[in-house]
Amino acid sequence: MNRRYRKTIIAGNWKMNKLPSEVKPFAEALKTLAPHAKWCETVICAPFVDLPAAIKAFKDSRVAVGAENLNENASGAYTGEVSADMLTDLGVKYVIIGHSERRQYYGETDVSVNKKIHAAIGAGLQPIVCVGESLEQRELGITLDLIKLQVTTALSGVEADKMRKIVIAYEPIWAIGTGKTATAEQANEVCCAIRATIRNMYGARIARAVSILYGGSMNEKNAAELLAQPDIDGGLIGGASLVPEKFAAIIATANQDQA
Ligand code: PGA
């Protein structure tokens, strides 16, 4: 973390978990356990149908609500899809874009990710853009080149003044939901390379201000070590964000005063 230059963000990614009726009890528990995180922005990204309940339940708190996906088109004949304006109209602030599960199961590519980013920022949403390598790609030694390509393509055509809205999440695919975390050094190396890519595209001042999160089996036990790394500005948390006690413990870690 480096709070002098950028925001610390702890974002939960509920994936396809929690019923709308389970949102309020979760929010009440989290508000009691993590009452006021002054130094860290807290976000809950929830399934579309949970969003109205989440907006309502977190209204009187500092927890922001995010979606897990959106359609890149503004409106029209796209049965079953949800637009950026629909999300902002509800009060949603963030949206996860290009999660590896969407790339793997729903055919999302760096190009569709780029279109979704434009749709999100056009509507005033803050994208949390996911990038990450597979185990095979890591073993081939192409991680940094691949990440650079993912970031460059995702941000293609995004103007400099929009960059303060964008959050990047580095999520090695082999660490997601597997209990296998990247070591803090491995994670920081890639986050540092992401920042270098942004520096090449937009210059040092903008690169210094972008929050870059780590995701992949982050939990209340390993959060402190990961967050102590200079280029890791927070976490995108799946499994551990479903349990208020665990998520609150990660928020508390991120909220600690920086030495
Ligand atoms: P995990 O998921 O924390 O359960 O590994 C992270 C993510 O996929 O965003």
Image (cartoon, rainbow, N blue to C red):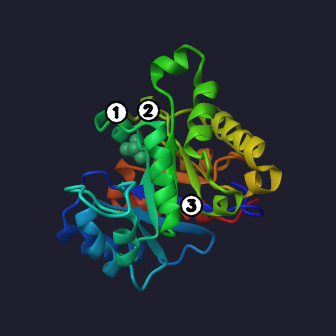
Instruction: Specify which label sits upstream in the sequence, 1 or 3.
Output: 3
- Mark 3 residue crowding within 10 angstroms, few (<14) / some (14–19) / many (20+): many
CA gap between label 1 and label 2 equals 10 Å
Identify the element where label 3 is drawn: strand
CA gap between label 1 and label 3 equals 25 Å
Is residue 106 or residue 71 the one in the foreground? Answer: 71
Type of the residue with mark 3? Ile
Task: Indicate yes or no: mark 1 CB to ligand 1 under 8 Å.
Answer: no
Residue 173, numbered circle: 2
Labels 1, 2: front one: 1
Do the numbered discs 1 and 2 sit on residues whose CB atoms are within 8 Å?
Answer: yes
Is residue 71 or residue 258 the one in the foreground? Answer: 71
The quadrant of the rendered image in which ligand 1 is seen is top left
Query: In the image, what residue occupies the spot 42% across and 59% down?
Result: 247
* Image quadrant in which you'd find residue 32: bottom left
The residue positioned farthest toward the front in the image shown: 76
Residue corresponding to mark 3: 9
Task: Indicate yes or no: mark 3 CB to ligand 1 under 8 Å.
Answer: no
Q: Position of residue 40 (x, y in %)?
A: 59, 67
CA gap between label 3 and label 2 equals 20 Å
Residue corresponding to mark 1: 104
Query: In the image, what residue occupies the spot 63% across and 53% down?
Result: 233
Q: Position of residue 82 (x, y in %)?
A: 30, 61
Instruction: Specify which label sits upstream in the sequence, 3 or 2.
Output: 3
Is residue 7 or residue 83 the one in the foreground? Answer: 83
The residue positioned farthest toward the bottom in the image shown: 60
Above/below status of 211 relative to 110: below
- Mark 2 residue crowding within 10 angstroms, few (<14) / some (14–19) / many (20+): many
